[in-house]
Image (spheres, coloured by chain):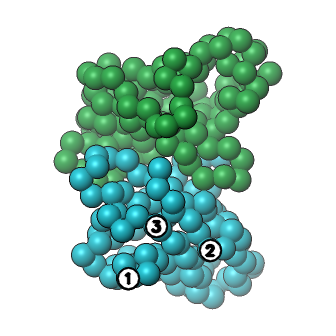
Amino acid sequence: GAVVSQHPSRVICKSGTSVKIECRSLDFQATTMFWYRQFPKQSLMLMATSNEGSKATYEQGVEKDKFLINHASLTLSTLTVTSAHPEDSSFYICSARDWGGHEQFFGPGTRLTVL
Amino acid sequence: GESVGLHLPTLSVQEGDNSIINCAYSNSASDYFIWYKQESGKGPQFIIDIRSNMDKRQGQRVTVLLNKTVKHLSLQIAATQPGDSAVYFCAEKEKDTGNQFYFGTGTSLTVIP
């Protein structure tokens, strides 16, 4: 149980385009989902917390207009990287937490490369 | 975010030996800690957790020790195997502030056959 999927697993796009990444909890309802970014050989940096039916809470330094988060249902959150630039190239990982739980279940990650 | 760091960025051990990975945290209000294992190109996997009202917790081949006095966390892996090679992160959550976990720098463990 507690499986989280991400789609796509890998995406390459041109600079200036927008990319949407999906995060799904497959066998539980996730009231809260989290989006992380991880650069090579670095730790996971929390970008934002996404609560179903409400606006996401962004960490300091993360541009909410550039990284659009939508958590429209209890099993799906999306992260859209708008007007992507090469410096946005990174590994984006989501995690999900069910109501009342402490543990977060992580997705497999999405490798974004912006040319 | 909070400062959660690891003492050693890399660690190499012989297969069969025990591994100890350390983590220092700075937020005394943190009340829940998790160790994660991350293999290359994959998301983190839960290994073991511990609450601040405990100082030791054991799992299968793994033990987590928590020293709140010096804000130190360690992960011990017994009889390390090649499949244990990965990056290990500690993560902490502050009591009553919601759901956010903050991750440490990470330690890359290499098991030498």
Mark 1, residue position: B69
> Residue sitting at 31 percent across and 36 percent down?
A32
Whole-Å distance between the Cαs marked 2 and 3? 13 Å
Q: What secondary structure is found at the residue carrying circle 3?
A: loop
User: In the drawing, what numbered circle is on residue B26?
Assistant: 3
Whole-Å distance between the Cαs marked 1 and 3? 11 Å
Q: Amino acid at mark 1?
A: Thr
The answer, for residue B98, to whether it is visible in the render is yes
Mark 2, residue position: B7
Tag 2 and tag 1, C-beta contact below 8 Å: no
Q: Position of residue A5 (x, y in %)?
A: 46, 35
Q: Quarter-wise, where is residue A83 in the image?
A: top right
Tag 2 and tag 3, C-beta contact below 8 Å: no
Of marks 2 and 1, the one in the foreground: 1
> Residue sitting at 28 percent across and 27 percent down?
A52
Whole-Å distance between the Cαs marked 2 and 1? 17 Å
Image label count: 3
Q: Amino acid at mark 3?
A: Ser
Q: Is residue B34 left or right of residue A97?
A: right
Tag 1 and tag 3, C-beta contact below 8 Å: no
> Residue sitting at 33 percent across and 57 percent down?
B94
Estimate how packed mark 1 is, as few (under 14), some (14 to 19) or many (20 or more) residues with alpha carbons within 10 Å. Answer: few
Could you tell me which chain the residue with mark 3 belongs to? B
Q: Position of residue A108 (x, y in %)?
A: 53, 42
Q: Residue furthest left?
A: A100
Q: Is residue A72 left or right of residue B77?
A: left
Q: Is residue A2 left or right of residue A87?
A: left
Q: Colour of chain B?
A: cyan
Q: Amino acid at mark 2?
A: His
